[in-house]
Image: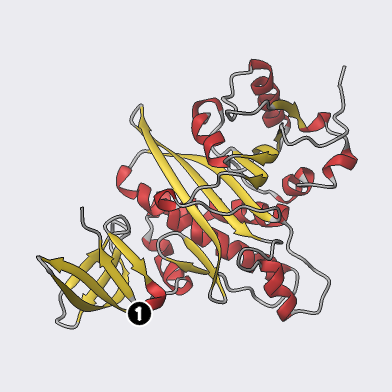
Amino acid sequence: MVVYVQALDCSLLVLCGKSLAENETAKAIKTSNTLKLPENGEYSLVLHSQLDKAVMQRSFKIHSFMDSLSTNQFGRLLIWSPQLTSTQDIVSQNFCELPIGSVCVADVQTKGRGRSKNVWESPSGCLMFSFTLQMEDGRVVPLVQYVVSLAITEAVKDICYKNGLPSIDVKIKWPNDLYLNGSKVGGILCTSTYKSKKFNVSAGIGLNVINEKPTTSLNTVLKELSTGAYQFQREDILAAFFNKFEEFYGLFVNQGFQTLEELYIKTWLHSGQRVVVQEKNGDKVIEHVVTIQGLTSSGYLLAVGDDNQMCELHPDGNSFDFFKGLVRRKLD
């Protein structure tokens, strides 16, 4: 007998698949009861088919997402919750229990994370999700975040084009931030572990879609550009992202990042940017002016000094304030 859930509860974790096969996988996951659920909370696993349709119309519209999804692997098994501490925790802690490409979405995150343990504010209206992928070549794992960033920016452009909207030009601030009209609207966090000769990668994304706080959002900017009634929906962006990511990821794995690099450079904020690199030499602070040229083969920033000396800038070895044109070497 199917028991329908007629009211949303923050402790729900909803499982849904794109096809019959993925829905059978969702049922098996629910039946096995092996998922590691968030601590300090009583969560209930339910299938999407157990939810009252009227209930889902008031929140993330899973059917709308699945109808727009055209991938072969990514996004086809979805876990959704009204509220989680972190979608990244769900996918990373259950990596082996979930099919590769599975995605976890939350309406609200209470402990969203950014790079270097920064907190990412995740209010209602923000698209927050994490998904899994697996790689064998550890040398290119750091480049995955660039593929994710590019897929997000291109997904937004695709939606604008298909709906006859003015182009919303989301830009990439290296290494993993998304900016719109000078304000941060999103960020990417990719983490990985090594097991059985493979890298298990969890990619987390936060994007301001409807929420005007804490900075701005896609819909806020759209209102300034268009008098039409269209508004961005989280479900549409998520589906457009996976459709684009699967295309880009295939190119990346089979042909290398160089096939995407030109488009990436067109989308980021830094081409030709001159920055001051500060580093300590004893008690003195030495400054070098460099011009950003692009990316190295390892995915680091490639810059050239006024003396024509090339240098590599690493995200974990430097503190970046690109809007002030300043890079500080981190010291132990």
Q: Which amino acid type is shown beneath numbered disc 1?
A: Gln
Residue, x 70% and y 53% (percent of image)?
A: 124
Identify the residue shown where x is 53% and y is 69%: 179
Per the image, label 1 sits on a secondary structure element best described as loop
User: In the drawing, does residue 44 fall left or right of residue 312?
Assistant: right
Residue pointed to by mark 1:
273
Q: How is the image coloured?
A: secondary structure
Left or right: where 150 falls relative to 284: right
Q: Judge from the rendering whether residue 55 lies leftward or rightward of residue 25; answer left or right.
A: right
Residue at the extreme left:
282
Where residue 68 sits in the image (x, y, percent)?
A: 73, 51
Q: Where, by quadrant of the figure, is residue 167 drawn?
A: bottom right
Instruction: Pinpoint residue 195: horizontal percent, then vertical percent.
Output: 36, 29
Q: x, y (%) of residue 201?
A: 44, 40
Q: Locate the N terminus by quadrant.
A: top right
Q: Residue at x 46, y 56 (%)?
A: 147
User: In terms of depth relative to the viewer, which is nearer, 16 or 252?
Assistant: 16
Residue 241 placement: quadrant: bottom right
Q: In the image, residue 32 lies at what x, y percent?
A: 63, 16
- 182 vs 4: above or below: below
Circle 1 crowding by C-alpha within 10 Å: few under 14, some 14–19, many from 20: some
219 relative position to 292: left or right: right
Quadrant of the rendered image containing residue 11: top right
